[in-house]
Image: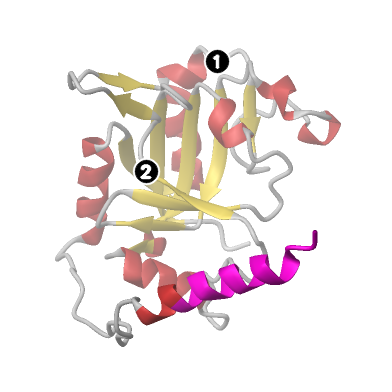
């Protein structure tokens, strides 16, 4: 026996009931507000990074970043380093020769570029452009992000404005369909309030804030 008409009718009846009993339509809230701003967004960002379990270090330029990186214990003790910046740190792994992300499970330190830094919550935007293996940001034991001081914004609203503004030099979404905000090292806590650092990803996060980044 063919029950398709009855099934279709039942479906339409259910959808009609949902439409009739739904909440009234409301206008979306305006995003043109006076969102939170800080007297010193850089200092606020550094404080928030520390609060979420990481560390942020302000350096003068790329040369100073090199010197700071060399002094980090995690870098000195690392046996395998992946740098996504050609002029920053060691490159012990050629990602172009890596077939599967699982091969990166023993990476100690990953060095990557951050495009934006948000003072409100200590988050750093990392673009997926030219990122051959996304997992490298999560499989490593320690993550180092290098960000320009001029890329520090006050709040998430300002960050998304830059990301979606096609005329802004910081607009990244136009060149890559993938990107993410990273805030602090990986961590989790249970109902007993026991905090575990490095539960699903890097055990530490270091952000180097360059006052004068490379012009190239």
Q: Main secondary structure of the magenta part?
A: helix
Taking depth in this image into account, of 71 and 51 the one nearest to the observer is: 51
Taking depth in this image into account, of 177 and 163 the one nearest to the observer is: 177
- Residue 78's disc is 1
At x 31%, y 19%, the residue is 196
Q: Position of residue 22 (x, y in %)?
A: 35, 76
At x 28%, y 41%, the residue is 49
- Quadrant containing the C terminus is bottom right
Q: Position of residue 54 (x, y in %)?
A: 32, 33
Q: State which quadrant residue 129 falls in.
A: bottom right
Judging by the rendered image, the residue that carries numbered circle 2 is 183
Neighbour tally class for label 2: few under 14, some 14-19, many 20 plus, Cα within 10 Å:
some
Q: State which quadrant residue 197 falls in.
A: top left
Indicate which disc, 2 or 1, sits on the residue closer to the N terminus.
1
Mark 2, secondary structure of its residue? loop
Q: Position of residue 145 (x, y in %)?
A: 47, 42
- Quadrant containing the N terminus is bottom right
Taking depth in this image into account, of 180 and 110 the one nearest to the observer is: 180
Q: Is residue 71 above or below residue 157?
A: above
Q: Nearer the viewer, mark 2 or mark 1?
A: 2
Task: Note whether residue 21 is visible.
Answer: yes
Q: Is residue 15 magenta?
A: yes
At x 18%, y 69%, the residue is 36
Magenta range: 1-16
Q: State which quadrant residue 207 falls in.
A: top left
């Amino acid at each position: 026996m063919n029950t398709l008409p009855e099934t279709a009718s039942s479906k339409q009846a259910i959808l009609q009931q949902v439409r009739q009993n739904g909440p009234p339509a409301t206008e979306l809230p305006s995003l043109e507000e006076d969102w939170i701003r800080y007297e010193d967004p850089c200092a606020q960002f550094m404080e928030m990074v520390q609060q979420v379990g990481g560390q942020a270090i302000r350096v003068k330029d790329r040369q100073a970043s090199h010197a700071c990186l060399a002094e980090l214990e995690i870098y000195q003790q690392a046996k395998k380093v992946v740098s996504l910046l050609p002029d920053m740190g060691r490159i012990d792994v050629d990602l172009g020769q890596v077939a599967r992300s699982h091969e990166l499970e023993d990476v100690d330190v990953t060095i990557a570029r951050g495009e934006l830094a948000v003072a409100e919550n200590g988050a750093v935007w990392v673009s997926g452009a030219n990122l051959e293996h996304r997992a490298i940001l999560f499989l490593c034991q320690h993550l180092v992000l290098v960000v320009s001081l001029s890329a520090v914004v006050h709040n998430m609203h300002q960050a998304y404005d830059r990301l979606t503004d096609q005329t802004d030099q910081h607009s990244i979404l136009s060149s890559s369909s993938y990107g993410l905000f990273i805030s602090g090292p990986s961590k989790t806590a249970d109902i007993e309030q026991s905090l575990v650092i490095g539960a699903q990803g890097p055990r530490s996060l270091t952000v180097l804030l360059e006052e004068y980044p490379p012009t190239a």
